[in-house]
Image (cartoon, rainbow, N blue to C red):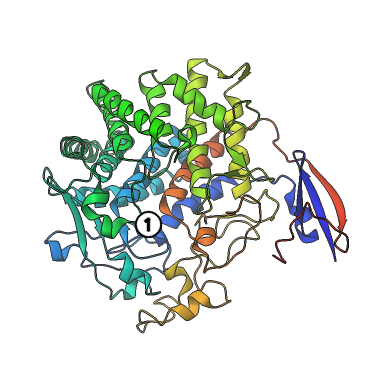
Amino acid sequence: MERICVVVCGVLLLMSTAMASVVSAQNPDYKLALSKSLLFFEGQRSGKLPPNQRLTWRKDSALRDGQEAGVDLTGGYYDAGDNVKYSFPMAFTATLLAWSIIEFGDGMAKGDEWINAAETLRWNTDFLLKATANLPNTVYAMVGNPYSDHVCWERPEDMDTPRPVYAVNTTHPGSEVAGEIAAALAAASIAFKTYDAAYSGRLLSKAKGAFYFANTYQGSYNNSIGGAVCPFYCDFSGYQDELAWAAAWLNRATNSRKYQKHVDTAIRKMKFKAEVTEYYNVDTEFSWDNKQVGIYVLLSQVIGQYEKEAQTFACAVLPESPTRTTKFTPGGLLFKTDGCNNQFVGALSLLALIYAKHLTQANQIITCGNTQFPPLKLVEFAKTQADYILGTNPMGMSYMAGYGPKFPQHVHHRGASLPSINTHPSFIACRDGFSYLNGPNPNMNELTGAIVGGPNDGTDYFHDDRRQSALTEPTTYANAAFVGVFAYFRSHPLKHSLSIRVQLYYVDEDKDNSDYVDKDKA
């Protein structure tokens, strides 16, 4: 059997003959990608679903959440492929959605998706308001027991596992979760300001209260409720980044510098921690756990400070930069982790576009050592990442369910993999769903718009296996970042092509081709 090797921007890749025709640059439909990336969130909804629910295979679920604590914690989003609700990543999802609307809402309006984006954000912030209902003393950080949830493979509509409520308070603090909620509500207050002024004001008021709680009662929720949140959403980077992030967003939301002293104090502590640990490459850290680069890009926008740190980020991700620290797969995908790598692809692409917008408006350039780049280079970087996700890659497939002719069919997601209530109205018990998890058939329902974890070993190979969550599980925060990315390119198409150079070489598999790994045989 013959294989075709492909040179992408000068790097040799191995791929099957069937892939060759789809590796060359596509013309991605960013309007469609934006629409589907928002539709995904309807598959993650918890609680009583609205009449205009479009993913109709999903039904009401978790209608008693919060009852054991005497509060209403229904609604919100399941974070990924399971049925647990974590306030920390949910809040980060809201912050990304709000920032996307603030910066690139024009692209959403052109695609008639602004209302869908606003509704997606509000489903989230409505829950965060419930999670902070008992301030100034308590923030609700989690609903559901991840351990009992993970021993089941069942639809959210059938959940019969315990739904305990985990909270942080003045004696058992959680500055990271309260800080991220403050950032999310502050950012959302800006996004909603001209659309619903009363709701915007409510969000901002609660954001101030959440920040006061996070900053006054400092401590990590790892120590307060770590038995529940760890290792799933353990805070590895510390909570100073969330304090700085929240304060920066409050500055922007209040159009003041009232919170700047909190920003500067938290950043000093954050930088000190980064200096004494080798765990993070802080130049490119932006995720539900670590907000460092996002803080610098936001502050460069709002107050024109921390430009050096923001420039360091740009130099770290630009492929042509002499000081680049980011790794890429041979096919050009940014690679940071072996677990849900696409979350970083989306987050850093969004940051690149926001920073490029700021630099363009400020008439500034990027300086990396002795080399200078125009802001357009950051846009080009983001476009290569977006296009890779949408199908311009050596596998010739999109990593968004329902987009393009070839996409993941075995998404790691309980509700999508099991038959819907529509087709199977009878109860499916906790353990009875594992035959669907482990079976070879495609998912029963399409989780349209879900962006899966993607290639995870530094190559461009992807195995569509529902059992491998690192590859096939979607997350709300991965999709949220791409909402902004697709919205940007929907309204700002590049004037020149970023097509990938493709050269084809036939490789004789009977010979020693030790430079290549045939993943189909691995």
- Residue 307: x, y in percent? 44, 20
Tell me the amino acid under the disc marked 1: Asp
Q: Residue furthest front?
A: 276
Q: Quadrant of the C terminus?
A: bottom right
Tell me if 34 is positioned left or right of 150 in this view. right
Q: Nearer the viewer, residue 232 or 498?
A: 232
- Residue 362: x, y in percent? 48, 16
Q: Secondary structure at mark 1?
A: loop
Q: Is residue 326 above or below residue 156?
A: above
**Measuring 28% from the left and 76% from the top, which residue is drawn there?**
160
Q: Residue furthest bottom?
A: 426
Tell me if 426 is positioned left or right of 47 in this view. right
- Residue 358: x, y in percent? 47, 23
Q: Nearer the viewer, residue 116 or 386?
A: 386
Q: Nearer the viewer, residue 292 or 71?
A: 292
Q: Which residue is mark 1?
A: 79
Locate residue 157: give its quadrant. Answer: bottom left
Q: Quadrant of the N terminus?
A: bottom right
**Measuring 40% from the left and 21% from the top, which residue is drawn there?**
306
How many numbered marks, from 0 up?
1
Q: Is residue 164 above or below residue 377?
A: below
Instruction: Tell me, yes or no, if residue 110 can be seen here.
Output: no
Locate residue 142: give its quadrant. Answer: bottom left
- Residue 133: x, y in percent? 15, 49
Q: Is residue 459 above or below residue 349?
A: below
Locate residue 248: give its quadrant. Answer: top left
Mark 1 closeness class: few <14, some 14–19, many ≥20 residues within 10 Å? many
Q: Nearer the viewer, residue 313 or 74?
A: 313
Instruction: Tell me, yes or no, if residue 519 can be seen here.
Output: yes
